[in-house]
Image: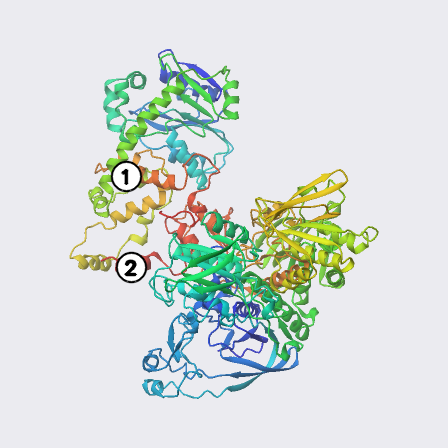
Amino acid sequence: MVPNNPKRPHVLVIGAGISGMHAAIDLAEIGCRVTLVDKSAAPGGILTQIDHQFPDDGCGMCRMLPMIHRDDCRQVCLRRGLDHDHIQILTQTEVFEVSGAPGDMTVTLATIPTGVDRKRCTDCGECETVCPVEIPDKFNASLSFCKAIYKPVPHQSGTMRTIDWDACTRCDACRKACPESAITLDNTPQTQTLQHIAGVIYTPGAELFDPSTVDLYGFGVLPNVVTSTGFERLLNSAGPFAETPVRPSDHQPIKKIAWLQCVGSRNLMIGADHCSTACCMIAVKEAVLAQEKIGSHVETTIFYMDMRTFGRDFQRYKDRAEIELGVRFIRCRVHSIEPADTPGDLTISYVNKEGQRIEETFDLAVLSAGRKPAPVLPDFVRHDGVFMTDAVQQFKDISESVIASGAAAAKLLKKIFRQTHPPDKISEDGSSADSQTRPVTKTALVVGGGPAGLSAALTLAGFGVKVALVEKKDGLGGNAAQIVDKDTRQSINQLIADVQNNPLITVYKNAQVISHQGIPGRFVSRIKLSGDTEKILVHGATVIATGGRAAQTDAYGLGSDDRIMTQFELEKRLNKGALDQHPPKSVVMIQCVGSREEPANYCSRICCIKALNNAIGLKQRWPETDIRIFYRDIMTVGDSETLYTEARRKGIFFIPFDVKRKPVVRVDGPDILVSGHDPVQGKEVRFKPDLIALSTGVSPNPAEDTVRIFGISLTVDGFIKEADYKWRPVDTPREGIFVAGLGRAPQTAQQSIREGEAAACRALRILASEAIKPQRVTAVVRHAICSRCELCIEICPYGARFYDTEQNRVMVDAAACQGCGACAAICPNSATLLGEFEDHGMMDALEAALR
Amino acid sequence: MHPFAFLKTDGHLSSSVAGFLKKLLTDKIADAVLVAAPTPYSSLPMPTLFTDPDLIEKADPLAPAAPFNSARQAVSVLKHETGKRIALVLRPCEIRALVELAKLKQCVLENTILIGVECLGRMENSAYLEASSQNTGLTQAFYDDPDMQKQICASCAICTRFQPVNADISLCVIGMPVNEAIGLSAETEAGLSILKQLGFETSDAPEGRKDAAGRLLAEREIAKAAAFEATREKTDSIEKFQRYFADCLNCHNCRVACPVCYCRECVFLTDVFAHDPEVLLRRASKKGMVKLPTDTTMFHMTRMAHMAHACVACGHCSSVCPSHIPVADVFIRVANEIQNLYAYEPGRDMIEPIPLLVFDEAGKEGV
């Protein structure tokens, strides 16, 4: 139950998937009380069914647990349930109406009863035993059966049974069998009204596409055709085939698996002009997992159109799957799946690289069913005070969900803060009650004045926090000068103006941070200002947004001929009318120039969209112009897929190439020549274009000094490394230091703005507290037997330990310590202990285990 | 090849080496020298910290004896920066242990001169005392007499790292006419400048040194492989392991002698293992009896888990065992496997991270 604490603003979060849970946890940590509602029977969304996430093939959801006020929350696996003092979860609940102004809204909810009184139920399971109705178990993707009274997510501890009212025959057997009289067979929805709601976050998540509507693939008819969620369940040790993964039809071992991508996505025939974003990497991960769980002998093949490996280390993960593990990637949309002659086997016909039609037999087919086309949103989402994680429903990578929900939470906080706190009322420093409790300095340092830094600064100032914005150059806006798109430019200019006009934000241009010390809530930084003066800044948190720039390359003759240019340059010329005198009759574009291969083996995110926009722009001006785009995989994830569709409709030609067989550009007297291999025609093609545009991508600004000063690190590609790419994408391993923007990962300016908001939201967990209290379980050092080897300092993932040279001892910052126990594990003589977890307990457990 | 100089011995090996060390003090190259020297009461050489140039004439770092691994004693004078420049004359295994201890923040090596000794091995203390009582010129005799060189202890007989690494200067005996001269190899810039300051001319090392070292290495590799196999057979099950350590008295001498067991207080001496009588009675009642003291196997296994990556194979754990358990044989063998697994060589390089700190679960299957 949520304590009725009037000091805490009450916030409603709709949708308890990963986005909703993340927003709820952050908001609760910042000081809100949260009601989290979901229309399904259990919280957790799609990820309750999926155990393994790339790139480490583990889970890691627990990394979202609160870290500053962690005693407010039960510190257990989040997949087993979220149990937080300030979060109330209502399942089987839908929101009908939202009214009132932000800060004091009224929300009407309707909850369908589970039929089981959770206070009385002892989880004895008698009801399930006697229930005569068997239904396909949705949790196991209908690969097994459950009763009409069932546990929606078996591994969740808080969730008791619920009744599937559509299947229930009202036979009364369960009610009679229940020894606690906990069951009532009444499904009348209960309506309730929540008042004084400060704001609402709407994060409905995606509904997955049901492939049984595509009859060519036989889903629902052929038992060995499963969805990717079904395959995850099939591999799961608690899934339908607990012992070893087998194929559904005859429980025979699985030897050869095919994945079919884009089922229900990127399909105009069914009105699905979108990419479902996450399915490519899910399929690659599943192929890797299949080898791990079933055995390396399993043959795995992925049929795809474009392999959308757009995020951190996605490309490397895919390369490893292909090169080291032998996962076969075939670029082809499969026409159909037919039953083979041998029972249970499946015949898949496809066209290979050489254009031949191949029929191949598999014993399992996995359909990568993405999201359904976005449904019509309820009216209340347009109500003032309702914040959405996305403009439409999306099926996203975890990392992007976490960032989007952080950004939505930040917007909500800004709004409700303005309603309730005039900015001049905020206290400078929190007051401290005892020596263990540390006051928080309500000032933030933001490093970098690009879109991410600007939006982070504004979000923080919107919450009444003073901000010092340090920019290396003498202007704000980062790469804004190079951005041609009017809307984006305008929104950045607006950010600059807002920052300059905000009395809480001080901008230091031509300035650099030269040292940074301290602990969350109280850092001390030295800033070198122009004219060689220095400023000491005391601040509670830091956001690093050092940005990036256009990648430099001389590939394909760039720089050697005026007609060979980057997409940035083409965009500029197109916009300025520089091409109008001699409109190009023929244009060749080449994608992934210097990226997605070592040493810069990452997707730059912006180039495909820029190339398509430029190509479409050219076609709009000069419809007769021939445009050919050499590409490896077009990365129009999500709804930007419509651009790709439009480009093809406009008659732009797309020629795929392999990284081992790149096109060749040659300047031959007055001509520029491009030659390459066209796999569709199966032959060499040559073009003599008037201009060549190269997608050269982005690279991070050099940040070696930054990471040294802040005690964090870089990825192999030079991006600032976050604490965890998926679950804590805008945190750094050091609590109190956050990261956002192009310096962290390739992204558009709009994404950077969102990321700045998300980073600010994480910083507010610290800055909104008056003081940071050490939590219950933290590490302590027994100085008398400590050898001062400092292994614990190096191993601590939270930077919570330091060597006190005055006292000659190793100290623990109890507020930063998360009680993980890494120090206790590496300490050879138990000179460090974790709270009350002493060795005796472990010894007793060992002794009990030994016979 | 490192610059090489000759130190004439002319039949007086020990005093020539001592004379070289004396010059470090008289020429103010070092403020103090830590080197093994017999005490006025016994011929057994003990690590001794010299500041008086006259007294250092007794030093005998080439004596085939080492009552313990002197890295421990080196640490006690290098605990923190003192402003004094200290020269340390150490065996290869002692330098390796010292480097490990420096990584563990137990000492600072910034202001030191490390002088390594090419080590043909040490004799057990009792054997050395016996031999030196009959032969006052034992050090010289040891290098002259191949038979005597076979009297080294078991761990030295399988040692393949007998040439120092990370030394500024090495005292070289392998492939040298020790009667006439030994070598001074300058292995760092600092080492070379000291040799120059002392007026040594440098040249290439004499021919044949490399071959002699190669021959010794080949012999030792063969001996090591055979010893590992023999030990493996004796310890390849928990039952055999317990038999191997059956006579252990839990005296913890092995851990005291171990140069890389750096804990101020071993966990086995803390309250963690100070069992209440109820615990002992409970354990006894499980099988009807319990041997006291308890936790013998656990002690050895835990110590192995803690130090195997850092074991420098000095063998002192065997030498100090009152029950004559060949402790080192099993520790060196296991350490060898662990170190191979992590491609880690203790003492090889100051900047090589300790495996525990960089352990990555992926790719380390089969641990």
Q: Are callouts 1 and 2 both on one chain? A: no
Figure check: B81 above or below A33: above
On the image, numbered disc 1 is attached to which residue?
B330
x, y percentage for residue A720?
A: 59, 51
Secondary structure beneath disc 1? helix
- State the residue position of label 2: A844
Query: Image height check: is A215 above or below B311?
Result: below
Q: Tag 2: residue type?
A: Asp
Please name whichever residue, B258 or A42, is drawn nearer the observer in this view of the structure.
Answer: A42
Q: Chain of mark 1?
A: B
The vertical placement of A88 against A428, above or below, is below
Q: Nearer the viewer, residue A664 or A202?
A: A664
Q: Residue furthest left?
A: B288
* Crowd rating for badge 2 (residues with CA inside 10 Å; few <14, some 14–19, many 20+): few
Q: Quadrant of the C terminus of chain A?
A: bottom left
Give the chain of mark 2: A
